[in-house]
Image: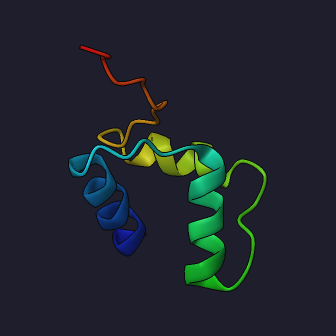
């Protein structure tokens, strides 16, 4: 979980939003198996500093 948390924090510093699906895919890469149905929700509860985000459009100015 520490590696995943570090990866998510890195993405946040670079301005990349993260979805639950992206977290699931990264867990699969790291662990070699898919996380359980509620694993991502429980992970986010354990790591309250991690926030999911949506990409926003750039200001056209």
Q: Residue at x 48, y 46 (%)?
A: 18
Residue 11 relative to residue 61: left or right = right
Comparing 61 with 28, the one in front is: 61
Residue 38 lies left or right of residue 5; in this view the side is right
Residue 33 appears left or right of 9? right
Residue 15 placement (x, y as % from top left): 29, 43
Considering only vertical position in the picture, is 56 above or below 14? above
Instruction: Give the camera-side residue of 20 and 15.
Output: 15
Residue 8 vertical position relative to residue 26 in the rendered view, above or below = above
User: Toward the viewer: 22 or 15?
Assistant: 15
Point out residue 22 in the picture as x, y percentages from the top left corner. Answer: 59, 55
Q: Quadrant of the N terminus?
A: bottom left
Quadrant in the picture for residue 31: bottom right
Q: Nearer the viewer, residue 29 or 38?
A: 29
In terms of image quadrants, where is residue 25?
Answer: bottom right
State how many labels appear. Answer: 0
Q: Position of residue 57 (x, y in %)?
A: 42, 23
Quarter of the image with the C terminus in it: top left
In the image, residue 42 above or below residue 55: below
Q: Residue at x 56, y 57 (%)?
A: 23
Which residue of the protein is positioned furthest toward the bottom in this rendering? 32
Single out the residue that lies furthest toward the front. Answer: 61
| 46 on left or right of 43 | left
């Amino acid at each position: 979980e520490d590696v995943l948390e570090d990866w998510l924090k890195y993405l946040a510093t670079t301005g990349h939003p993260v979805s639950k699906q992206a977290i699931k895919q990264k867990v699969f890469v790291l662990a070699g198996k898919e996380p359980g149905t509620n694993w991502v929700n429980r992970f986010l509860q354990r790591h309250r500093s991690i926030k999911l985000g949506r990409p926003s459009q750039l200001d056209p100015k």
